[in-house]
Amino acid sequence: TADGAQQTFNVPILDDAIVEGDEDFGVEITTTSPIAGIGVGTATTTIQDDDGVTFDVSGPAFVTEGTDTFAVYTVTQSGELGVGQSATVDYSTVELGTGVGFATEGDDFTAVAGSLDFIGTADGAQQTFNVPILDDAIVEGDEDFGVEITTLSPVAGIGIGTATTTIVDDD
């Protein structure tokens, strides 16, 4: 072939859903020709990871005071955590305001806070937490409170991070 001639070859890159960070691979070319040599015989390529993990929280729009003892919330993972990877999702209740229409910690619901650990879990993994609903004999109308989730994980983020629930008054 002529001086400066080039040949190309392809290395297939396989897509996956695992959050693993960028990865490098190398190729090396060699020759067995007694009359040709190799100038630069290696090359390194970086595969940029396009996967991500997010967590969403969902829960009931309504619970009834005196009937429902808990509001159950679900944290759902989107995307896959690889082997040895983990993410901790912290959750807590939130008072959305004060006065008419807003639930109060200790009077209408019990404040909760905690953590959920997702370790090497697949897309769609779920964990739940409960918020106790308190019954009282006060005629006060329906009242709202919320829950929120956060994470400090370097391999995950938050998609839908809040949920609001209305406590329907039974008095």
Image (spheres, rainbow, N blue to C red):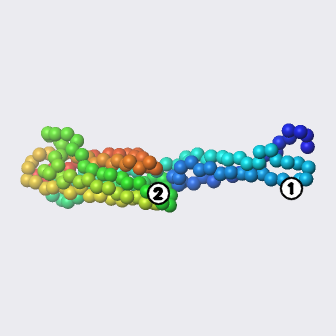
In the depicted structure, whether residue 5 falls above or below residue 21: above
| Residue that badge 2 annotates | 85
**Closer to the camera, 116 or 57?**
116
Asked if residue 49 lies left or right of residue 60, the reply is right
Viewport quadrant of the N terminus: top right
Q: Image quarter for residue 143?
A: top left
Q: Is residue 67 visible?
A: yes
**Closer to the camera, 112 or 6?**
6
- First in sequence: mark 1 vs mark 2: 1
Residue type at the position of mark 1: Thr
Labels 1, 2: front one: 1
Residue beneath the point at 73% across and 48% down: 42
Q: Position of residue 14 (x, y in %)?
A: 63, 53
- Answer few, some or many: residues within 10 Å of disc 2's Cα (few below 14, many 20 plus, some between 14 and 19): some
**Closer to the camera, 61 or 28?**
28
Asked if residue 51 lies left or right of residue 94, the reply is right
Q: Position of residue 110 (x, y in %)?
A: 18, 54
Q: Which element is circle 2 on?
A: loop
- Answer few, some or many: residues within 10 Å of disc 1's Cα (few below 14, many 20 plus, some between 14 and 19): few
Residue type at the position of mark 2: Gln
Q: Position of residue 95 (x, y in %)?
A: 21, 44
Q: What number is the disc on residue 32?
A: 1
Asked if residue 145 lies left or right of residue 6, the reply is left
Residue beneath the point at 85% across and 48% down: 37
Q: Is residue 125 visible?
A: no
Residue beneath the point at 37% across and 49% down: 151
Q: Position of residue 118 (x, y in %)?
A: 41, 58
Distance from the alpha carbon under mark 1 to that under mark 2: 44 Å
Residue beneath the point at 67% across and 47% down: 44
Q: What number is the disc on residue 92?
A: none
Q: Which element is circle 1 on?
A: loop
